[in-house]
Amino acid sequence: MSQTRNTRKSHGMVTAQDVAKEAGVSLTTVSRSFSEAGLVSKQTRDRVLSVANQLGYSPNIAARVLASRRSRLIGLMVNNFDDPENLNLFRYVSAEAQKRNFHAILFNTSPDRQEAGLDSMESAMLHQVDGLLVSATRLEPAIIARCASQDKRIVIVGRKSRRPEFSSVYCDNEDGAAQVADDFFAKGVQRPAFVGGSPTASVSLERRDGFVKRIEELYGFQPIVREAGSNDYAKGFATAKALLDLPKPPDAYFCSSDLLAIGVTDAISEADSVKTGERPLVVGFGRTMLSRLKAYDLASVALPMEEMVRTATSHLIDTLGDARTGPTKIVFPCELMSPEARK
Amino acid sequence: MSQTRNTRKSHGMVTAQDVAKEAGVSLTTVSRSFSEAGLVSKQTRDRVLSVANQLGYSPNIAARVLASRRSRLIGLMVNNFDDPENLNLFRYVSAEAQKRNFHAILFNTSPDRQEAGLDSMESAMLHQVDGLLVSATRLEPAIIARCASQDKRIVIVGRKSRRPEFSSVYCDNEDGAAQVADDFFAKGVQRPAFVGGSPTASVSLERRDGFVKRIEELYGFQPIVREAGSNDYAKGFATAKALLDLPKPPDAYFCSSDLLAIGVTDAISEADSVKTGERPLVVGFGRTMLSRLKAYDLASVALPMEEMVRTATSHLIDTLGDARTGPTKIVFPCELMSPEARK
DNA sequence: CTGTTAGCGCTTTCAA
DNA sequence: TTGAAAGCGCTAACAG
């Protein structure tokens, strides 16, 4: 190979080669000194590291990825940017990933983007993400196929995966919803209603199904069910408005998220029908910051968001290595909490 | 070179080489067919692309990054995961980046993480991010130094950069705050107060300074100033509580964020002193979802979040190429809006 | 424990 | 317009 260049490459980047030369060891030894395993004597390693430090060397990730076929990058696919709670997804995924020397690369798959899901998936693949964390919502079949074909490890966080090939980490949405039904029943609710978010979002569906099922068991009839269309405040508001116009409006609303519940609550506060009569119950889901606002002080089903997200992230990272740990489901419990409950 | 392997590498990945062979062209031509520029005849290109497609080829990003020294990755450094508004940062950065075939890689620099700022910076460098988008808060000097040394392009979004070497895209926080002062004055407020978030966050400081300055001009004295400590609901609540216990509590609160304002409002609602007298004014900043909640219906200074974030992102991407476009400042106007104002 | 030797898959001069 | 060749900087067998 023509060594027409001098030690420092034209780009001014110090390479492992430079360090090797300077420390009087081989390139391999430098490489090894930078990988965790103890393939190198502490003595040599220390020297290498110190020389590297002196020279201002740091390994080139791209080269590492190319050679090792591992990127230490996990793709984070998210499509809901309306629910404030999703901020916690970013927070804990990034925190947990970084703790383990991984990083999250963001894929916005929200439906209002042109090149949504599948394209993101492609990009993700190209970026050699080691694994994929998919937030709550439904995956398009095309995407699923694409993943499967690459047998990338995928963990779905927030909802149960129907596809057996994916792991998922979630809370027991059905059970949480059933608790609400029980509560309604115990409180003598007559006309229970469910207000869901996006009818394609599994989380919302799971909560709906759990609720409907238990209501049927308890009451012998189905609750009123409305899908707001998406998980957002205005939609919750509008949906409740419509419900309040019914001849006999519901006397209790179970909403598939706190965000919707806030909207529903506000609609109720405005309604004339309510000002005269009894105030209907409203229960949300998530026990997020929103449910804690004093002005609402909403009953809500609590779920261990941080633990869920961290678990999902570390589970993903942990199982990247083993060819087949097989898809796993990790379930966390939910618990309906009244607003007074201090946490 | 020993060609001991067959066409398809052991890893089952189709390479540009494979495509070249199959299409009867050179590796170079394949590469060129995949880069935008028209360095290749339409005819050849089409053939290459079709063959590639047939073979299921897609370029390996790591190799591309290694060879080209460009990653099409922008680092997004964020340290506030409490303010729901920050979700919009993720939303619009990722949307805008993806639109331009870039991706955002997330760096959580929140102070509660051990290996916060500087380490993230290191990682960012290693990941060969082409540029860095830094959200509103203050940058540590060490980080600044590190960036400068690599002369990476950096854009600060949400606040004015004090360092001349960085570009920033922000709204005129001082002016927005001054508008609030004017409003207070016009409404006959007697004892104005400012409630800030983190005293190290420039956004909060800019808003404070703008407010204090104008109040002084109008009133000839300084408003009461309190720093909640961080931009979060509970802190806002607690701060207002303390203020309400003063012998002569403020009759108007300007808060550096809607989140704080909500907390302040709730504290006020609870206070005995208020139940009897006049209800003090509360004004927030951002005109976020929170300020629109009917239960609060908060006056707030509106800022063009989407435009700001998108502009910052595309400005960053646009200026990656040119060695020295020189740091730029792009300012958007703010406007105080009363709750009634429909938007 | 350390070094040698091949690449990983792509971009990029330089020549044709 | 196309191709040949030389790496980008690192990892990973395989020896020793």
Image (cartoon, coloured by chain):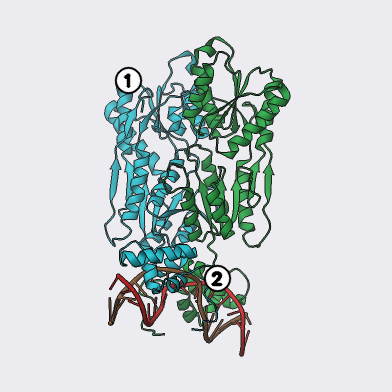
Chain colours: A cyan, B green, C red, D brown
Q: Position of residue B242 (x, y in %)?
A: 50, 20
> What's the residue at 55%, 13% (across, down)?
B247
User: Does residue A55 sit above or below A329 in this rendering?
Assistant: below
Label 2 is placed on what type of residue? Answer: Phe
Q: Tag 1: Cα neighbours inside 10 Å, few (<14), some, or many (≥20)?
A: few
- Read off the chain for label 2: B
User: Does residue A50 sit above or below B243 in this rendering?
Assistant: below
Label 1 is placed on what type of residue? Answer: Lys
The C terminus of chain B sits in image quarter: top right
- Read off the chain for label 1: A
Q: Tag 2: Cα neighbours inside 10 Å, few (<14), some, or many (≥20)?
A: some
Q: Position of residue A107 (x, y in %)?
A: 48, 53
Closest to the observer, B206 or B57: B206
| SS for callout 2 | helix
Hey, which quadrant is residue B8 in on the image?
A: bottom left
Q: Mark 1 — residue?
A: A187
> What's the residue at 53%, 72% (across, down)?
A8
Residue that extends furthest to the top in the rendered view of this protein: B276
Q: Mark 2 — residue?
A: B34
Q: Which mark is residue A33?
A: none
Closest to the observer, A197 or B82: B82
The N terminus of chain B sits in image quarter: bottom left
Observer-side mark, 2 or 1, equals 2
